[in-house]
């Protein structure tokens, strides 16, 4: 029996029963009080904790860009967070003046103050990075892991799927996915784009002279590009060859189809039905829920979106319409740890599961891990860094390797559970300097009110 439990039970026995119990009760009450606060960081008096600074170090080639932020306080403890992958650190820095002097333990209050400065995709990165760091700070101040403050765990290990380098040769791509399975991953994802068709006549119609490419900024419905039956069959055949290597049992998701029209999405979805895909991702932009619903209703393969959506409201709308089968927030865009748990809980009540999009350093990874642990309808968490040998070395304090046979163990230490390995961090910085002063952002302000 842990000492704390023993003390508490002894105290209850003593104070409830005894005739001459007053002196004893007083003694045990003191002991119990000590036990109750023994995990609170002694450097910290949470009610007097204040934010004094925010600084950023930008890691590159992880393989993505990871702006890692540190929020400092008047009591020596700090919180770590991360701006969304590939995003500008400016999204966080412009919020510095809004959080200085605040008590970081008032996470929701600060989130509501700054959320007006976030937006979809990378624009949400600053608000979410700060929110993660506030949870890290609150956890350290009170001595508890973040998942515990969210209501506790549904699971001790978080299932991951990994990004896998593409090949236009299905044998090579299949072998790479099989290698992921052999590493212990229990869920796989592949990219499956119309670029596979570019050398095969009769597979894709498009306005002559305009070949839609993967990076094209013209939205799917406006390219005029449509798959032929032959093209859809060829993409289906590619998946068939991958399935031959990985088997039919493991869930296999697919993304990055290219910018083809809604009817072609349906044609492709039907061609893929017999390969039992786990989901088809972002077939058209999330801003068109009726079009997603049209695709979802037409094919018997789960349809998914969500990695670019900021705040819970659009997720709930998509779930309420059943426009997609699965939602896929990126916690560094969707509003941070608490907002993402709220998203999971709200869509779960509508029968929709939550997968989690993620590309970033182990700092944001752990924010995802705590949220995934505490959210009932969680399915699987993405990771893009399995092939980056130093990725896990960026931090200390958690079990290594961080992803072990396809799962991440939920940390039990206060806050997010990681500290930075400064030496490794400094080897992978994008720009000179390491958490340099940011005083130029201390006084940035506007009249922030949203209503009169
Ligand atoms: Mg995606």
Image (cartoon, grey):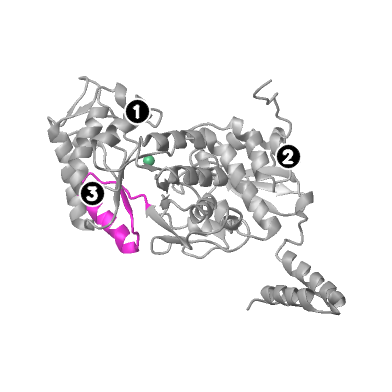
Q: Quadrant of the C terminus?
A: top right
State the SS at label 3. loop
Residue nearer the viewer, 44 or 297: 297
The image shows residue 289, relative to residue 2, as above or below, that is above
Q: Position of residue 322 (x, y in %)?
A: 36, 37
Residue nearer the viewer, 239 or 108: 108
Is residue 346 a member of the stretch shown in magenta? no
Q: Residue 276 carries which label?
A: 3
The image shows residue 249, relative to residue 93, as above or below, that is below
The quadrant where ligand 1 appears is: top left
Identify the residue shown where x is 68% and y is 37%: 96
Q: Position of residue 121 (x, y in %)?
A: 48, 34
Is residue 177 a member of the stretch shown in magenta? yes
Mark 3 crowd level (few <14, some 14–19, many ≥20, 10 Å Cα): some
Identify the residue shown where x is 49% and y is 65%: 400
State the SS at label 1. helix
Q: Distance between the residues labelled 3 and 1?
A: 24 Å
State the SS at label 2. loop
Q: Is residue 96 left or right of residue 380?
A: right
Looking at the rendering, the stretch of residues picked out in magenta corresponds to 162-189
Residue nearer the viewer, 198 or 313: 313
Q: Where is residue 146 in the image (x, y as percent from the top left)?
A: 59, 55
Q: Which mark is residue 290?
A: 1
Mark 1 crowd level (few <14, some 14–19, many ≥20, 10 Å Cα): some
Mark 2 crowd level (few <14, some 14–19, many ≥20, 10 Å Cα): some
Q: Are marks 1 and 2 in contact (CB under 8 Å)?
A: no
Residue 154 visible in image? yes
Q: In this view, does 148 lie to the left or right of 45?
A: left
Residue labelled with disc 2: 100
Q: Are marks 3 and 1 in contact (CB under 8 Å)?
A: no
């Amino acid at each position: 029996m842990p000492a704390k439990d023993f003390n508490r039970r002894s105290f209850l026995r003593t104070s409830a029963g005894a005739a001459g119990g007053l002196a004893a009760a007083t003694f045990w009450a003191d002991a119990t009080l000590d036990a109750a606060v023994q995990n609170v960081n002694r450097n910290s008096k949470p009610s007097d904790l204040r934010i004094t600074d925010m600084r950023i170090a930008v890691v590159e080639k992880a393989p993505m860009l990871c702006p890692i932020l540190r929020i400092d306080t008047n009591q020596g403890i700090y919180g770590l967070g991360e701006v969304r992958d590939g995003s500008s650190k400016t999204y966080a820095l412009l919020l510095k003046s809004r959080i200085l002097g605040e008590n970081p333990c008032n996470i929701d209050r600060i989130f509501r103050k700054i959320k007006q400065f976030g937006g979809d995709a990378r624009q949400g990165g600053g608000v979410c990075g700060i929110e993660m760091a506030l949870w890290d700070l609150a956890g350290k101040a009170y001595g508890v892991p973040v998942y515990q403050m969210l209501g506790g765990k549904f699971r001790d290990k978080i299932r991951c799927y990994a990004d896998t380098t593409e090949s236009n040769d299905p044998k090579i791509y299949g072998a790479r996915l099989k290698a992921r399975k052999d590493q212990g991953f229990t869920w796989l994802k592949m990219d499956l784009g119309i670029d596979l068709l570019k050398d095969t006549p009769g597979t894709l119609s498009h306005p002559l002279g305009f070949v839609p490419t993967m990076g094209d900024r013209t939205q799917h419905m406006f390219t005029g590009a449509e798959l032929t039956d032959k093209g859809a069959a060829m993409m289906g055949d590619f998946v068939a060859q991958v399935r031959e290597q990985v088997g039919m049992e493991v869930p296999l998701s697919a993304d990055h189809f290219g910018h083809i029209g809604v009817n072609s999405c349906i044609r492709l979805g039907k061609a893929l039905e017999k390969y039992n895909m786990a989901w088809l991702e972002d077939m058209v932009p999330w801003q068109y829920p009726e079009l997603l619903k049209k695709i979802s209703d037409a094919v018997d393969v789960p349809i998914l979106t969500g990695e670019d959506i900021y705040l819970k409201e659009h997720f709930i709308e998509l779930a309420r319409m059943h426009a997609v089968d699965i939602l896929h927030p990126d916690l560094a865009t969707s509003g941070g740890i608490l907002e993402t748990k709220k998203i999971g809980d709200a869509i779960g009540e509508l029968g929709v599961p939550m997968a989690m999009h993620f590309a970033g350093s182990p700092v944001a990874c752990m924010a995802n891990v705590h949220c995934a642990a505490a959210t009932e309808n969680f399915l699987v968490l993405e990771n893009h860094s399995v092939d980056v040998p130093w990725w896990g070395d960026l931090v200390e304090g958690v079990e290594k390797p961080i992803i072990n046979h396809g799962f991440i163990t939920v940390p039990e230490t206060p806050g997010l559970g990681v500290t930075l390995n400064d030496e490794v961090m400094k080897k992978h910085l994008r720009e000179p300097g390491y958490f340099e002063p940011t005083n130029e952002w201390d006084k940035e302000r506007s009249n922030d009110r949203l209503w009169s």
